[in-house]
Protein backbone atom coordinates (compact mmCIF):
# COMPACT_ATOMS: atom_id res chain seq x y z
CA UNK A 1 0.00 0.00 0.00
CA UNK A 2 1.39 3.44 -0.95
CA UNK A 3 1.55 5.65 2.11
CA UNK A 4 3.32 8.65 3.65
CA UNK A 5 3.63 9.31 7.38
CA UNK A 6 4.91 12.61 8.76
CA UNK A 7 6.43 12.90 12.22
CA UNK A 8 8.46 15.44 14.16
CA UNK A 9 6.02 18.27 14.72
CA UNK A 10 5.60 20.02 18.04
CA UNK A 11 5.94 23.26 19.97
CA UNK A 12 9.11 25.31 19.45
CA UNK A 13 10.14 28.80 20.44
CA UNK A 14 10.79 31.52 17.86
CA UNK A 15 14.31 31.19 16.54
CA UNK A 16 14.36 27.49 17.26
CA UNK A 17 14.74 24.50 14.96
CA UNK A 18 12.75 21.41 14.15
CA UNK A 19 13.21 18.51 11.73
CA UNK A 20 10.19 16.88 10.16
CA UNK A 21 10.33 13.37 8.73
CA UNK A 22 8.18 11.87 6.01
CA UNK A 23 8.48 8.08 5.80
CA UNK A 24 7.24 6.41 2.65
CA UNK A 25 5.98 2.90 2.09
CA UNK A 26 5.06 1.27 -1.18
CA UNK A 27 7.40 3.40 -3.27
CA UNK A 28 10.91 4.89 -3.08
CA UNK A 29 11.29 8.55 -2.08
CA UNK A 30 13.99 9.00 -4.72
CA UNK A 31 11.76 7.72 -7.55
CA UNK A 32 9.35 10.66 -7.60
CA UNK A 33 9.25 14.38 -6.92
CA UNK A 34 8.52 15.00 -3.24
CA UNK A 35 7.08 18.15 -1.75
CA UNK A 36 6.27 19.81 1.56
CA UNK A 37 3.09 21.87 1.75
CA UNK A 38 1.84 23.67 4.84
CA UNK A 39 -1.49 24.99 6.05
CA UNK A 40 -1.68 27.63 8.74
CA UNK A 41 -4.67 27.41 11.09
CA UNK A 42 -7.83 28.35 9.21
CA UNK A 43 -5.88 29.20 6.05
CA UNK A 44 -5.23 27.68 2.66
CA UNK A 45 -2.48 25.47 1.32
CA UNK A 46 0.98 26.96 0.79
CA UNK A 47 3.85 25.32 -1.03
CA UNK A 48 7.09 25.09 0.98
CA UNK A 49 9.65 23.00 -0.88
CA UNK A 50 10.20 20.45 -3.63
CA UNK A 51 12.93 17.89 -4.15
CA UNK A 52 13.27 16.60 -7.69
CA UNK A 53 14.15 12.99 -8.48
CA UNK A 54 17.79 13.95 -9.10
CA UNK A 55 18.00 15.77 -5.78
CA UNK A 56 17.63 19.37 -6.93
CA UNK A 57 15.68 21.41 -4.40
CA UNK A 58 13.41 24.45 -4.62
CA UNK A 59 11.98 26.61 -1.85
CA UNK A 60 9.28 29.22 -1.50
CA UNK A 61 10.53 32.75 -0.83
CA UNK A 62 9.06 32.65 2.68
CA UNK A 63 11.38 29.83 3.82
CA UNK A 64 14.40 30.22 1.53
CA UNK A 65 17.61 30.35 3.56
CA UNK A 66 15.94 28.94 6.68
CA UNK A 67 14.60 25.55 5.56
CA UNK A 68 16.40 22.68 3.84
CA UNK A 69 15.24 19.32 2.55
CA UNK A 70 17.04 16.03 2.28
CA UNK A 71 16.32 12.34 1.94
CA UNK A 72 17.69 9.11 3.33
CA UNK A 73 17.17 6.39 0.76
CA UNK A 74 18.10 3.63 3.22
CA UNK A 75 15.29 4.76 5.51
CA UNK A 76 13.02 5.73 2.59
CA UNK A 77 12.44 9.02 4.37
CA UNK A 78 12.22 12.64 3.22
CA UNK A 79 13.13 15.39 5.68
CA UNK A 80 12.38 19.06 6.22
CA UNK A 81 14.90 20.85 8.41
CA UNK A 82 13.44 24.09 9.72
CA UNK A 83 15.76 26.66 11.29
CA UNK A 84 15.23 30.16 12.68
CA UNK A 85 11.53 29.44 13.01
CA UNK A 86 9.04 32.31 13.12
CA UNK A 87 5.51 32.49 14.52
CA UNK A 88 4.21 32.65 10.95
CA UNK A 89 5.66 29.16 10.33
CA UNK A 90 2.94 27.74 12.59
CA UNK A 91 1.01 25.28 10.44
CA UNK A 92 0.22 21.68 9.69
CA UNK A 93 2.96 20.39 7.40
CA UNK A 94 2.08 17.80 4.76
CA UNK A 95 4.49 15.84 2.62
CA UNK A 96 3.29 14.54 -0.74
CA UNK A 97 4.49 12.52 -3.74
CA UNK A 98 4.53 13.83 -7.28
CA UNK A 99 2.28 11.93 -9.66
CA UNK A 100 4.43 10.04 -12.16
CA UNK A 101 2.02 10.50 -15.07
CA UNK A 102 1.67 14.27 -14.72
CA UNK A 103 3.37 17.50 -13.83
CA UNK A 104 3.41 19.63 -10.67
CA UNK A 105 0.67 17.46 -9.15
CA UNK A 106 0.77 15.38 -5.99
CA UNK A 107 -1.27 12.20 -5.66
CA UNK A 108 -0.23 10.70 -2.31
CA UNK A 109 -0.35 12.80 0.85
CA UNK A 110 0.45 12.15 4.48
CA UNK A 111 -1.94 13.10 7.26
CA UNK A 112 0.27 16.01 8.30
CA UNK A 113 2.19 16.99 11.42
CA UNK A 114 1.47 20.16 13.39
CA UNK A 115 4.16 22.73 14.12
CA UNK A 116 3.53 25.53 16.59
CA UNK A 117 6.04 28.34 16.94
CA UNK A 118 5.34 30.30 20.09
CA UNK A 119 7.07 31.65 23.16
CA UNK B 1 4.62 35.91 -5.51
CA UNK B 2 0.81 36.13 -5.38
CA UNK B 3 -1.36 33.12 -4.93
CA UNK B 4 -3.79 32.15 -7.63
CA UNK B 5 -7.21 33.79 -7.27
CA UNK B 6 -10.27 31.69 -6.45
CA UNK B 7 -13.73 32.71 -5.25
CA UNK B 8 -14.02 32.31 -1.48
CA UNK B 9 -17.22 30.33 -1.75
CA UNK B 10 -19.63 28.74 -4.19
CA UNK B 11 -22.84 26.85 -3.60
CA UNK B 12 -25.26 24.66 -5.46
CA UNK B 13 -28.15 22.28 -4.96
CA UNK B 14 -27.90 18.52 -5.30
CA UNK B 15 -27.93 17.50 -8.94
CA UNK B 16 -26.81 20.89 -10.21
CA UNK B 17 -23.44 21.77 -11.75
CA UNK B 18 -21.03 24.32 -10.35
CA UNK B 19 -17.80 25.80 -11.65
CA UNK B 20 -14.89 27.12 -9.60
CA UNK B 21 -12.51 29.50 -11.32
CA UNK B 22 -8.80 29.94 -10.69
CA UNK B 23 -7.09 32.98 -12.17
CA UNK B 24 -3.36 33.36 -12.53
CA UNK B 25 -0.99 35.09 -14.90
CA UNK B 26 1.01 34.40 -18.02
CA UNK B 27 3.86 33.18 -15.77
CA UNK B 28 1.82 30.29 -14.41
CA UNK B 29 -1.59 29.17 -15.71
CA UNK B 30 -1.20 31.09 -18.96
CA UNK B 31 2.04 29.45 -20.01
CA UNK B 32 1.72 25.93 -18.63
CA UNK B 33 -0.78 23.08 -18.80
CA UNK B 34 0.23 22.04 -15.30
CA UNK B 35 -2.90 22.98 -13.36
CA UNK B 36 -4.18 20.71 -10.61
CA UNK B 37 -7.22 20.70 -8.35
CA UNK B 38 -7.44 19.32 -4.82
CA UNK B 39 -10.38 18.52 -2.57
CA UNK B 40 -9.93 18.88 1.19
CA UNK B 41 -12.29 18.03 4.01
CA UNK B 42 -11.76 19.80 7.36
CA UNK B 43 -8.86 18.33 9.28
CA UNK B 44 -7.93 15.98 6.43
CA UNK B 45 -5.20 15.81 3.83
CA UNK B 46 -5.82 17.20 0.34
CA UNK B 47 -6.88 14.77 -2.39
CA UNK B 48 -5.83 15.21 -6.01
CA UNK B 49 -8.92 15.49 -8.24
CA UNK B 50 -7.53 16.87 -11.52
CA UNK B 51 -3.99 17.18 -12.92
CA UNK B 52 -2.53 18.65 -16.09
CA UNK B 53 -5.69 20.78 -16.50
CA UNK B 54 -8.05 18.01 -17.60
CA UNK B 55 -6.83 14.63 -16.35
CA UNK B 56 -8.46 12.65 -13.57
CA UNK B 57 -6.45 10.27 -11.38
CA UNK B 58 -7.73 6.74 -11.18
CA UNK B 59 -10.71 6.50 -8.85
CA UNK B 60 -11.90 10.10 -9.16
CA UNK B 61 -15.49 10.43 -10.32
CA UNK B 62 -16.07 11.64 -13.88
CA UNK B 63 -18.43 14.24 -12.40
CA UNK B 64 -15.24 16.26 -11.88
CA UNK B 65 -13.74 17.94 -14.91
CA UNK B 66 -11.17 20.64 -15.57
CA UNK B 67 -10.48 23.18 -18.27
CA UNK B 68 -8.34 26.22 -19.01
CA UNK B 69 -8.67 29.37 -21.08
CA UNK B 70 -5.89 31.92 -21.12
CA UNK B 71 -4.80 32.66 -17.58
CA UNK B 72 -7.87 31.09 -15.96
CA UNK B 73 -8.48 27.45 -15.10
CA UNK B 74 -11.81 26.00 -14.03
CA UNK B 75 -13.09 23.01 -12.11
CA UNK B 76 -16.62 21.85 -12.88
CA UNK B 77 -18.53 19.46 -10.68
CA UNK B 78 -21.67 18.07 -12.27
CA UNK B 79 -24.50 16.23 -10.55
CA UNK B 80 -23.62 17.78 -7.19
CA UNK B 81 -23.80 15.46 -4.21
CA UNK B 82 -23.74 16.17 -0.50
CA UNK B 83 -20.32 14.49 -0.23
CA UNK B 84 -18.84 17.10 -2.58
CA UNK B 85 -19.12 19.72 0.16
CA UNK B 86 -15.47 20.55 0.90
CA UNK B 87 -12.73 23.07 0.22
CA UNK B 88 -11.19 23.06 -3.25
CA UNK B 89 -7.75 24.37 -4.15
CA UNK B 90 -6.18 24.92 -7.53
CA UNK B 91 -2.45 24.85 -8.09
CA UNK B 92 -0.16 25.57 -10.99
CA UNK B 93 3.47 25.33 -11.91
CA UNK B 94 4.93 28.82 -11.91
CA UNK B 95 7.96 30.04 -13.79
CA UNK B 96 8.88 32.28 -10.87
CA UNK B 97 8.16 30.23 -7.79
CA UNK B 98 7.80 26.64 -8.93
CA UNK B 99 4.38 25.91 -7.42
CA UNK B 100 1.48 28.18 -6.58
CA UNK B 101 -1.79 27.43 -4.81
CA UNK B 102 -5.05 29.29 -4.95
CA UNK B 103 -6.60 30.66 -1.78
CA UNK B 104 -9.23 27.94 -1.73
CA UNK B 105 -12.98 27.82 -2.39
CA UNK B 106 -15.53 26.52 0.08
CA UNK B 107 -18.23 24.55 -1.72
CA UNK B 108 -21.58 24.35 0.04
CA UNK B 109 -24.20 21.88 -1.15
CA UNK B 110 -27.55 23.42 -0.26
Image: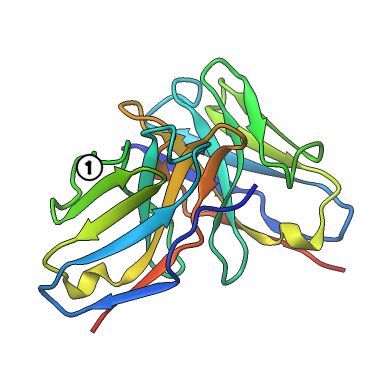
Query: Residue A21 at x, y = what percent?
Result: 62, 41
Q: In the image, A95: left or right of B50?
A: right
Chain identity of mark 1: B
Residue at (41% x, 32% y) in the render: B32
- Is the image coloured rainbow, by chain, by secondary structure, or in one colour? rainbow
| Relative depth, front residue between B23 and B92 | B23
* Residue B17 against residue B92 in the figure, above or below: below
Residue sticking out furthest to the bottom: B110
Q: Is residue A46 above or below residue A43?
A: above
Counting from the top left corner in percent of width and height, residue A30 is at 50, 21
Q: Residue furthest top?
A: A54
Mark 1 neighbour class, 10 Å CA radius: few under 14, some 14 to 19, many 20 or more: some
Pick whichever, B14 or B28, lies toward us.
B28
Q: Quadrant of the N terminus of chain A?
A: top left
How many numbered callouts? 1
**Residue topped by disc 1:** B56
The image quarter containing residue A97 is top left
Q: Quadrant of residue A27?
A: top left
Q: Nearer the viewer, residue A117 or A66?
A: A66
**Quarter containing the C terminus of chain A:** bottom right
Q: Is residue B39 above or below residue B67?
A: below
Q: Residue at x 41, y 67 (%)?
A: B105
Q: Residue B89: where, in percent of width, then height? A: 42, 57
Q: Position of residue A106 (x, y in %)?
A: 41, 39
Q: Residue at x 48, y 48 (%)?
A: B24
Q: Which residue shows up at 60% across the image and 48% down it?
A: A7
| Secondary structure at numbered mark 1 | loop
Amino acid sequence: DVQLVETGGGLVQPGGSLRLSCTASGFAVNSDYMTWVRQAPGKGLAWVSIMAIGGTTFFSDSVKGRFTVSRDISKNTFFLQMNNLRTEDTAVYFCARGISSGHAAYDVWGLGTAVTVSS
Amino acid sequence: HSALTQPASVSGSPGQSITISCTGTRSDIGDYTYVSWYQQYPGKAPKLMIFDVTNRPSGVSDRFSGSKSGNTASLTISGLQAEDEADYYCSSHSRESTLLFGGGTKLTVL
